[in-house]
Structure formats: structure tokens, C-alpha cells
Amino acid sequence: MNLAKKAEWSERENKSLVKDWISSSCCVPWTSASENMGTLINKQLLFLLFLLLKPLQFVKITDPHLSPERRQEIEDYINDLYATGPTKPPTKETFKTRVIIDSEMPLTDREYCNLEMKMKRVHNRLYCVKEHFFLQASYDDIQKICHNMFVQCKDGIRKCHRSRKIISGVHCVLTSGVMMPFCEYISSYKEGWVFITCQWEDNTGEIIPVSVTDILAI
């Protein structure tokens, strides 16, 4: 079999995998105590398929077991992942989804980052991010920090805002891996003053938090 035919065959196989995955029971949401773990397993399977596929556009999910909200979330995620345009600017919802945590898992758990980074889909077009912070606080409390006076970020270059209250969080640092789901992180519980960057969002007409740059331990 020549290379052209092999490539064509491989592409057909990959598309078939997607179709099988969409219609399989792997996507049925889990309930009760197994819900979080089931979601994690589903996302890991999705990530593995992403690594196999060529860019897709306008994906339509037809799995009858998924709720309309969940189906739309997956469609938007896939289409955004393989979009050819520039990366979407940060939004209020992005920050809430990726940074704010309300988890029953202890923040001191050694596997916290490995699980939450996958659960919250924290990555850069599937590439591992080198560093990330999770905060145990309400979004409103974090947004208020944007109105505090400017201070230097830990890199000494950018302008940050520092919290006036002590906030708990988890610092995730990449130890190995290049792409999801093979990113491995070391988790460090931190409690202290939070440093964040903020920017104006035209759509909402308000200043929003964009990223967490540090938690200065007390």
C-alpha cells in the first residue's frame, strides 16, 4: 500500500472512531458519587481522539444521551479547538471555569492538579500549560481585586492587582508531558495574598480578572 492510500485509510479510520465515540456509552454522564470521575474519563477519551484527528470544523454531536447544554458545550469546544482564526480573548466565563474551584477534593491532595487540569480543560490548544493557579473564592471577590491599586507582578514587568484578603488556592507546575492528557503536574497548596492581572471587557462593560500570577504565602 502506497503512502497516499495509507493516509486516506488512516483518515477514514479516524472519522470512524469519532462516529463510534459519539454514539457509544462512554459519553453518558455519570451520576451521584461517580459523576466527577466519569466526567474525567470521558474527557480523557475525548482528548485521545483529538490527538488522532486532523482539524475538524462545524462538528455536530447527535448522541441522544447528552443534554442539550452538554451537547452544545462539546460542539463549541471542538470547533473552538480547531478554529483557524486567532485565539479568543479571555472572558468572565473562561476565568470562572478555569480558575474558580468549588471541589470536595482537599486542596492538599497531591493529585489535585492532575485531576482538575483535565476536568477544567486547562491547556493551550491541547498543549500543556507550564503553570496554573486555582483559587477557592467566589468570582465576585476575585473581580473586586481588579479595583485595587497596581503592584508589580512577580516577574517585575507586568502590572498586577493584589488581594487585601487571604485566599486559599493550589499552584500547579508542569513536571512532564507536552500535550493533554499526558500533562503531569505537582500540586502545592497555598494560602496568602493573590496577584492577578485584569483587563477591560467591551462586551460586558466591566473590568475582569484575566490570570493569576502568584499567591504570596503568609
Image: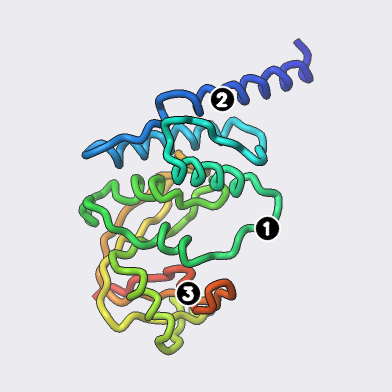
Mark 3 Cα within 10 Å, few/some/many (few <14, many 20+)?
A: many
> x, y percentage for residue 145?
38, 80
Q: Are marks 2 and 3 in contact (CB under 8 Å)?
A: no
Most extreme residue toward the top is 1
Name the residue nearer the viewer: 98 or 113. Answer: 98
> x, y percentage for residue 155?
48, 75
Relative to residue 11, is residue 204 depicted above or below?
below
At a point 22% along the width and 52% down the height, the residue shown is 104
Q: Please name the amino acid that badge 2 sits on.
A: Lys
- Residue located beneath label 2 in the image: 19
Relative to residue 95, is residue 2 depicted above or below?
above
At a point 48% along the width and 42% down the height, the residue shown is 180
Quadrant in which residue 147 is drawn: bottom left
- Residue located beneath label 1 in the image: 86
| Circle on res. 50 | none
Q: Secondary structure at mark 3?
A: strand
Q: Please name the amino acid that badge 3 sits on.
A: Ile
- Residue located beneath label 3 in the image: 208
Mark 2 Cα within 10 Å, few/some/many (few <14, many 20+)?
A: some
Q: Secondary structure at mark 2?
A: helix
Most extreme residue toward the bottom is 149
Question: Mark 1 or 3 closer to N-term?
Answer: 1
Report the Cα–Cα distance between label 1 and label 2.
28 Å
Q: Are marks 1 and 3 in contact (CB under 8 Å)?
A: no
Label 1 vs label 3, nearer the camera: 3
Quadrant in which residue 97 is drawn: bottom left
Name the residue nearer the viewer: 173 or 71. Answer: 71
Coloring basis for residues: rainbow
Q: Are marks 1 and 2 in contact (CB under 8 Å)?
A: no
Label 2 vs label 3, nearer the camera: 2
Quadrant where the N terminus sits is: top right
Name the residue nearer the viewer: 205 or 17. Answer: 205
